[in-house]
Image: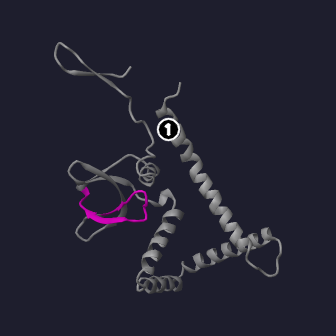
Amino acid sequence: MPTPGTWKRDFASGLIVLGPLLVTLYIIRWFFVRLADLTLFGIDNPYQRVALLLVFFTLLVFSVGYLMRTTFGNVIESGIDSTMNRLPGLRVIYNASKMAVETAVAGPEDLQTPVKLEPWPGMRMTAFKTGKTTTDGRDVLFLPTAPNITTGFVIEVDPDEYTPTDETVETALTRILSAGFGESGDRGIPIDVTEEPDDGRAYADSD
């Protein structure tokens, strides 16, 4: 018979699967309703209005993206960043939104290798190499916060002050974004520690 602990784990597992799915569907529905309510060129069919707006938005994104590949586009982006960073309060929202979009659209191949950093004795944290170095030879690392990886600390450390790992970027991001609850991989085998009466040492039985 399932124990209360088993029921709790089953409920939590089901909630982890259904919760994000329901939130995503709700957001999609919210955007669809808002777009369908817009008046557009006298089109009465809401599906046609939404489709036309999506096509227009896609073309706009590609046009701006192409513009950003030019020198003129870089000047415009620098001007927008400079203007927004002069506005108290709004600059926080602007920078957080920009970093969130950059994080969302950047594929795992665009992220650098995760490393282990020990900021205090006995405490280990996950950071990411940025591929940048300082003039005095230190590596620039990004130490994200959990579960919001759009915030964190940019730190400069000597190469021998962090430890490279063999884990993938996906594994490191899963651990950080889930606040440690989404750890994947082998967690090890539970052991039963028993005392031997002859020498007093503990032995682990993994059977």
User: From what the image shows, is residue 78 above or below residue 145?
Assistant: below
Task: Give whichever of 175, 19 is nearer the camera.
Answer: 19
Q: Say whether residue 205 is left or right of residue 23.
A: left
Residue 63: quadrant of the picture: bottom right
User: From what the image shows, is residue 68 above or below residue 146?
Assistant: below
| Three-letter amino acid code of the residue under disc 1 | Lys
How far from the left and from the top, in percent, is residue 195? Answer: 23, 19
Q: Secondary structure at mark 1?
A: helix
Residue 187: quadrant of the picture: top left
How far from the left and from the top, in percent, is residue 138? Answer: 25, 64
How far from the left and from the top, in percent, is residue 122? Answer: 22, 47
Counting every numbered tag in the picture gives 1
| Residue segment shown in magenta | 140-159
At 25% from the left and 62% from the top, the residue drawn is: 157
Task: Give whichever of 125, 20 is nearer the camera.
Answer: 20
Q: Say whether residue 153 is left or right of residue 150.
A: left
- The residue indicated by pointer 1 is 8
